[in-house]
Amino acid sequence: MDNTQPTLNVHNKHEHPPMHTAEHILNQTMVRMFGCPRSKNAHIEKKKSKCDYLLAEEPTAETMAEVERKVNEVIDRHLPVTIDYLTREEASGIVDLSKLPEDVSETLRIVRVGDYDACACIGDHVNNTSEIGHFKFLNCDYTDGRLRVRFKLTD
């Protein structure tokens, strides 16, 4: 198998690895709890980050507290974060490929967070979720079917 890293038509900005890995866990938690797609739009930075999700209705504050609790529960499992290189065909049974550009390489870089999440991604990540810290929502707002969540990590 070809183990070269695929070239994607996206900026190759180096996100803060703990925050970027936390985004993967948040995405999978949202998918599992709401049945929605992964974040439609994300802005990942060291101090704070934001993600947008398409939801049919606004979640309650209690539900969002449960999302935060579940994200931290996954982080606290100290899961290994690993990288595999798979063909698009192999990856299609594991990850959602709908957001990839049409001209993406035949070989994809799949980032796995233990048994919890798998995603095609070119970003930087921690080696283990024990390196992330504590996930905390700063605020959430819901407008016209879009939930925007802002979050940070603390020690």
Image: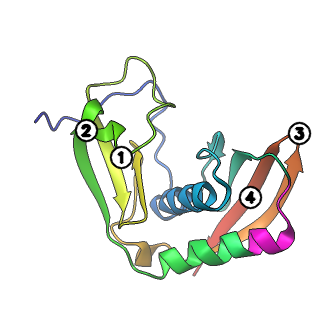
- Helix, strand or loop at disc 2? helix
Q: Position of residue 34 (x, y in %)?
A: 68, 56
Quarter holding residue 41: top right
- Helix, strand or loop at disc 4? strand
* Vertical placement of residue 92 versus 150, above or below: above
| Badge nearest the viewer, 3 or 2 | 2
**What residue is disc 3 on?**
144
Among numbered discs 1 and 4, the one appearing first in the sequence = 1
Task: Tell me the residue at 54%/58% (across/down).
Answer: 28
Among numbered discs 3 and 2, the one appearing first in the sequence = 2
Q: Position of residue 122 (x, y in %)?
A: 38, 42
Among numbered discs 4 and 2, the one appearing first in the sequence = 2
Quadrant (top left/top right/bottom left/bottom right) for the C terminus: bottom right
The amino acid beneath tag 1 is Ile
Among numbered discs 3 and 4, the one appearing first in the sequence = 3
Task: Tell me the residue at 75%/56% (across/down).
Answer: 149
Residue 115 vs residue 139: left or right? left
**What residue is disc 4 on?**
150
The amino acid beneath tag 2 is Glu
Quarter holding residue 101: top left
- Helix, strand or loop at disc 3? loop
**Mark 1–mark 2 CB contact (< 8 Å):** yes
**What residue is disc 2 on?**
90
**What residue is disc 1 on?**
94
The region drawn magenta spans 58-65
Mark 1 crowdedness (10 Å alpha carbons): few <14, some 14-19, many ≥20: some
